[in-house]
């Protein structure tokens, strides 16, 4: 996975594809370990995006409360 910014939806889609590949009974142990590692990294990145969005929403709500909106 590259360091460039990937959308949340892309992270989820790629995670789903990885899961499908991991379910293949013909997959080697080595390949499954690499896929597992990549999948976990994508999930970590997606979770970070959710946390970032949550903080933004909380900041917006706090500003609205301060302004009496």
Image (cartoon, helix red, strand yellow):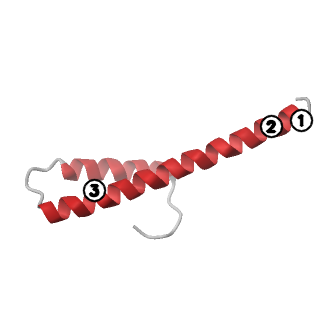
User: Mark 1 or mark 3, which has the lower sequence index?
Assistant: 3
Q: Dot 2: what SS?
A: helix
Cα distance in 3D space between marks 1 and 3 = 45 Å
Where residue 57 sits in the image (x, y, percent)? 70, 40
Q: Which mark is residue 66?
A: 1
The residue carrying mark 2 is 62
Cα distance in 3D space between marks 3 and 2 = 39 Å
Vertical placement of residue 50 versus 67, above or below: below
18 on left or right of 25: right
Q: Dot 1: what SS?
A: helix
Q: Residue at the top extreme?
A: 69
Where residue 58 sits in the image (x, y, percent)? 72, 39
Mark 3 surroundings: few (<14), some (14-19) or many (≥20) residues within 10 A: some
- In the rendered image, which quarter contains the C terminus? top right
Q: Which mark is residue 36?
A: 3
36 on left or right of 40: left
Q: Which mark is residue 37?
A: none
7 on left or right of 67: left
């Amino acid at each position: 996975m590259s360091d460039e910014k990937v959308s949340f939806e892309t992270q989820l889609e790629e995670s789903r594809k990885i899961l499908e590949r991991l379910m293949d009974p013909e997959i080697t142990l080595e390949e499954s370990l690499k896929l597992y590692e990549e999948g976990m990294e994508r999930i970590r990145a997606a979770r970070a995006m959710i946390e970032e969005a949550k903080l933004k929403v909380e900041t917006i709500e706090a500003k609205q409360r301060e302004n009496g909106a």
